[in-house]
Image (cartoon, grey):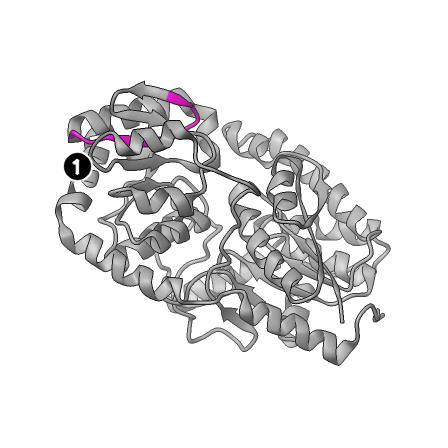
Amino acid sequence: MRMRVLIIGVGTRGNVAPYTGLGMRLREAGHEVAVAAHEPYAELVTDAGLDHLPLPGDPLSALTGRFSISAFKEYSEQLMEGLTAIAEQEADLLLLGMAGAPGCHVAEAMGVPSMGVHLQPIDPTGDFPPLLSLFRRSLGRWGNRRAARLAFEVPAAGPMLAGMSTKMRTRLGLPPMTPRALYRRRESTRWPVFHGVSPLVLPRPADWRPGLEITGYWWPLRPRGWQPDPVVRDFLASGPTPVFVGFGSLAGARAEQYTELAVQALRRAGLRGVLQTGLRGRISDDVLAVGDVPHDWLFPRMAAVAHHCGSGTTGAGVRAGVPAVAVPVMNDQPFWASRLTALGVAPAAIPCRRLTPARLAAALTTTITDPAYRQRAQALSVRVSAEDGAAPVVEAVNQLQVTRGPGRRTG
């Protein structure tokens, strides 16, 4: 029987693309799937054959304006309005990304169950400090767990706009509930959370409660009818295998700066390069700047990939079986960078604020000349590619359908 499943994907491109792959698998299992995402990423959703529900606001405006408090506040208000409006939609199940806490209020108002489908591990563990906080070094096992729990319980520190809880509950006509009470309810009910990350990249913390699972990556779909640009094909065939340098969604805010840095690094290292730094076109005979090119097609054709270590880009690099150079910028990116180093597929990370042409050139040279990086990357790729990260989510949705019944609402 068909269920109406609504996935809420808040954030930039990397926070939406994996849900296209997950949504496609749910659709193949017979369910009706829609993805709520910001307007710039609507085509990602519709190209996958899924329905798109627009969320107002542009997260890039809050992230690229030197972290302006006013821009972030404006974005938060727009997002709250969009999430509140979702309660008017018809759905049997909500799957929540990093909108976790606000999305739970929406599901409660709709009278439908919800599950977490996270791309980052934000639940308390002693294994590492909370990802979306100012802490970068371990606080010890007790300290790590306590700091992560406070992120849920204190509105100002909550994961992904948890401070909206009070306003949202009022607008949705729900009784007041503190973030601490919401967290306790979440834990007492063992609210299920599936993480779209390979357990080979992130082993499941042994101190996690039941219901928190790491399933494997949810691979994004290529755009419908996509074919590689002949310019890109010709460049790849015109000389030695190039390296990739990219900085994710934030690159557009500093396109010229990032491009110049990358070009200088490639010249120092004597390498050809494909850049995803915000510009497009032929930079020189040995450097090509590209726009959106599916990483699952591009990365296997690279000698190495230097990137910002967003969760999805990290997974694409692992899947491609090529060594990496980690240049994390913010949020969870230093964590994924540390995982690549620990797995032996990348040398020590270079935080973006410390990145120079000389450092990037040296790191690229190291990854290419030391065969151990490529050997480990290829071995990891074989195992990660064999995983089916979507299967446990599909099974959980199907099981919920059996125990609850399609279209039936609960109070």
The residue depicted at 13 percent of the width and 45 percent of the height is 369
Circle count: 1
Residue 186 left/right relative to 315? right
Placement of the N terminus among the 4 image quadrants: bottom right
Q: Residue at x 35, y 50 (%)?
A: 317
The quarter holding residue 210 reads bottom right
Mark 1, secondary structure of its residue: helix
Q: Nearer the viewer, residue 181 or 363?
A: 363
Q: Residue at x 47, y 25 (%)?
A: 253
Whether 75 is drawn above or below 108: the answer is: above
Residue at x 39% of width, y 62% of height: 385
Q: Is residue 194 left or right of residue 5?
A: left
Between residue 302 and residue 76, name the one nearer to us: 302
Front residue of this view, candidates 18 and 409: 18
Residue 8 appears at what percent x and percent y?
Answer: 66, 52
Q: Is residue 296 above or below residue 72?
A: below
* First to last magenta residue range: 270-281
Query: How crowded is the residue under tag 1: few (<14 C-alpha within 10 Å), some, or many (20+)?
Result: some
**Magenta-span inclusion, residue 52:** no
Q: Position of residue 90 (x, y in %)?
A: 82, 56
Q: Amino acid at mark 1?
A: Ala
- Tell me, yes or no, if residue 158 can be seen here: no
Q: What is the quadrant of the C terminus in the image?
A: bottom right
Kindly give the residue lying farthest to the bottom in the view shown: 403
Q: Could you say where residue 405 lies in the image, as x and y percent from the top left?
A: 79, 75
Q: Which residue is mark 1?
A: 362
